[in-house]
Image (cartoon, helix red, strand yellow):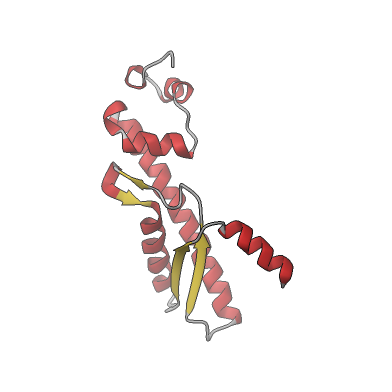
Amino acid sequence: MAVKHTDCNSWKEFTIAVNLDAAGLTRMMNNPEQFKLEYVETTFQIYERSAKLVAASLAGLVQNLNAAYPSVQKVQVLAEGSLFWSKVKTHDTKYVDIVNATVKELLSELGLATEVQVSRIENANLIGAAMSVLS
């Protein structure tokens, strides 16, 4: 790497010097001493916003499910992926915890008592695809 993270004077220089995919952002949040504080905080805001958007999607799904099947009281969501199950040093936070807290808050605002359980299972995407083909 030609440019040191801490030598970057602008966000543009920084994005050229650092890989900004999910792994790069997670690495930055887990090694905050290697980066400018404002960059670490910005990456955490992206991380948090991503989790809240996932939660909003899940809350919308539950809302639609509840409209069609009001008797459903519990929904289990299977998730896989390094981002979903990541934990970062910045704010000592887990992605899934942000999702769970936000889903709970949004469902409460919607007046829904449906419980959403996010579970981890290996090959969740493959299993889901196989189940959809078989049903």
- Measured as percent of width and height from the top left, residue 67 is found at 57, 79
**Residue at image x 42%, y 79%?**
113
**Residue at image x 43%, y 49%?**
49
Q: Is residue 99 above or below residue 113?
A: above
Q: In the figure, residue 35 lies in which quadrant? A: top left
Q: Is residue 57 left or right of residue 108?
A: right
Q: Quadrant of the N terminus?
A: top left
- Measured as percent of width and height from the top left, residue 111 is found at 43, 77
Q: Is residue 112 left or right of residue 89?
A: right
**Residue at image x 45%, y 71%?**
116
- Measured as percent of width and height from the top left, residue 124 is found at 56, 59
Q: Is residue 81 left or right of residue 113?
A: right
Q: Quadrant of the C terminus?
A: bottom right
- Measured as percent of width and height from the top left, residue 90 is found at 29, 42
Identify the residue at the far top of this view.
2
Q: Is residue 128 left or right of residue 62?
A: right
